Image (cartoon, helix red, strand yellow):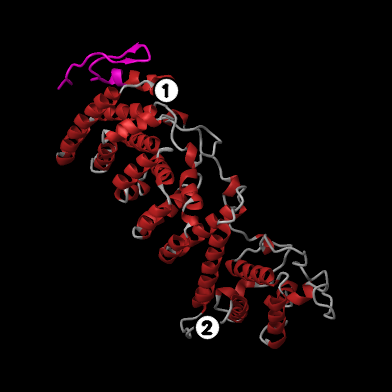
Amino acid sequence: MAAPRLPPARLSGVMLPAPIQDLEALRALTALFKEQRNRETAPRSIFQRVLGILKKSSHDIELACREPSQAESLGSSLQLVTECFRCLRNACIECTLNQDSIRNLDTIAVAVDLILLFRELQTEQESLLTAFRCGLQFLGNVASRNEESQSAVWARAFPELFFTCLNHHDKKIVAYCSMIMFTTLNMERMRELQENLNVAIGVIEAHQVQPESEWPFLVVTDHFLKDPELVKAMFAKLSNQERVTFLDLMIAKILSDDSLTTDDVPVFLSHAELMAGSFVDNCRSVLKITSEHQTEDEGYPGLLERVIDLLRLVHVAGNDTTSPFAAAGCIKAECDVSSVADGFKSHLLRLIGNLCYKNKENQDKSHHACMVEPGLDSTTPACQSPHLHACLDIPATCPCERPGRRAADPGQLWHRRQQPLSDPVGGVCHPKPHGGQQPKPESDRRDGAAGPGQRVRPHQAGLRGGKAG
């Protein structure tokens, strides 16, 4: 049904078709809104007309959801929806006036409801994915640098739209959804995430699936990590592999070019306490693979004591020929560590070394542990390694700090350098965190993105005018 005929509208001296009722007219508007001067002079009636087309198309799609057999005939409706979203997306670029006009027409609610309808369609048409992507782009742009629009998008989209899109098979949909979350999140809304942890965990899962995408990465590093309570709640619910990913993102933030602010320091100290507590509580669980019969945890007062104790237990487990730790052998600094057991030991040694660096109390504890523990003898291959003895005799590595103590053999002390260890022994390491070296996404200009190599911050968030979704 044709839209009611209205007087022609002028946009910066350009006569527009009236009424706007077909695809070509919408495409003309989309192109016009690429220019800033056209965006700034757009009358409110333009957005009312676009919204009318969007509502009619939404009705057609809703009917198709009720009758799945009609889904394949939605091509023209999906094209109109796509072009409506592109038009509105472009109109919002760096134009608060248009953002406000579009929001006040309740277009955000219509867009979110329509996007949620897309998941109900039983079709894999590319036109559906394109409409889906463009709808998310519009929501990102209407919220960019506009607090009232951010509130409107969050109120309508959370949590259902975020959960739906973060679990979508299309990578662009996941990325654009993450962009919206990045743009709309603040400390108050992160409290809401604590009550909907599946959404927050969905961001971690999205980063695991596509680590090259910058938006999930930024959501975690620039938002989640600022809230110790959210981090604590998430960490308790994450799987072991998800925890490793979360830790990598923490490390990436710490090592990034953006140094921690004064406000960040106590927050990250809280994160460190959480990680240390988790290690103390759970580190011995790795030994469950060595025996079917386990004793109850005795409990240890501190992190260093627990690490040294765990190293002892791994060593003892290595004497059992049926244990995977028996294959650990000798850890050599000049050789690659090929087994999981060797890698685990090397990381324990590195942790002990870092805990004892310039810390007299911890140096005394580690030296005492080495002197009183007969189990760490030198008759087994694992303890013939100079690295094990070097790490358990940490005070010897700092003779200038401990006068009167014997000097260590330089040939046996792989960790003598006067700085904390930052690289694992024997070449075992996690994949490099993304941090400042985070791979940049491919150019998304045809999707309306900011362009290659540009790290978009909250005040810059939003997508430039493009055509394809």
Q: Which image quarter is the C terminus in?
A: top left
Q: Residue at x 24, y 30 (%)?
A: 54
* Image vertical order of residue 409 relative to residue 255, above or below: below
Q: Are marks 2 and 1 in contact (CB under 8 Å)?
A: no
Which mark is first along the chain, 1 or 2? 1
Using the image as rendered, state which of residue 264 and residue 445 is in the foreground.
Answer: 264
- On residue 34, the disc is 1
For the residue marked with disc 1, what is the amino acid? Lys
Can residue 125 be seen in the rendering of this structure? no
* Relative to 316, residue 56 above or below: above
Q: Tell me where residue 37 appears, x and y as whole percent.
A: 43, 20
Question: Is residue 106 found inside the magenta-colored segment of the image?
Answer: no
Q: Whole-percent x and y of residue 301? A: 57, 81
User: Position of 151 compared to 244: left or right?
Assistant: left
Which quadrant would residue 409 be assigned to in this image? bottom right
Q: Residues within 10 Å of mark 1 (few under 14, many from 20)?
A: some
The answer to which of 308 and 85 lies nearer the viewer is 85
Split into 4 quadrants, where in the image is the N terminus? Answer: top left
Q: Residue at x 80, y 73 (%)?
A: 401
Real-space CA distance between mark 2 and mark 1, rounded to the nearest whole angstrom: 64 Å
- Magenta-highlighted residues: 1-26
The amino acid pointed to by label 2 is Gly
**Quadrant location of residue 454?**
top right
Relative to 366, does residue 374 appear above or below in the rendering?
below
Estimate the x, y position of residue 351 in percent, counting from the top left.
64, 69
Q: Is residue 23 magenta?
A: yes
Q: Would you say the magenta stretch is mainly helix, strand or loop?
A: loop
Q: Residue at x 23, y 20 (%)?
A: 21
- Using the image, tell me which numbered label, if any, was put on residue 299: 2
Report which quarter residue 304 is drawn in. bottom right
Q: Picture coordinates of residue 109 (x, y %)?
A: 26, 39
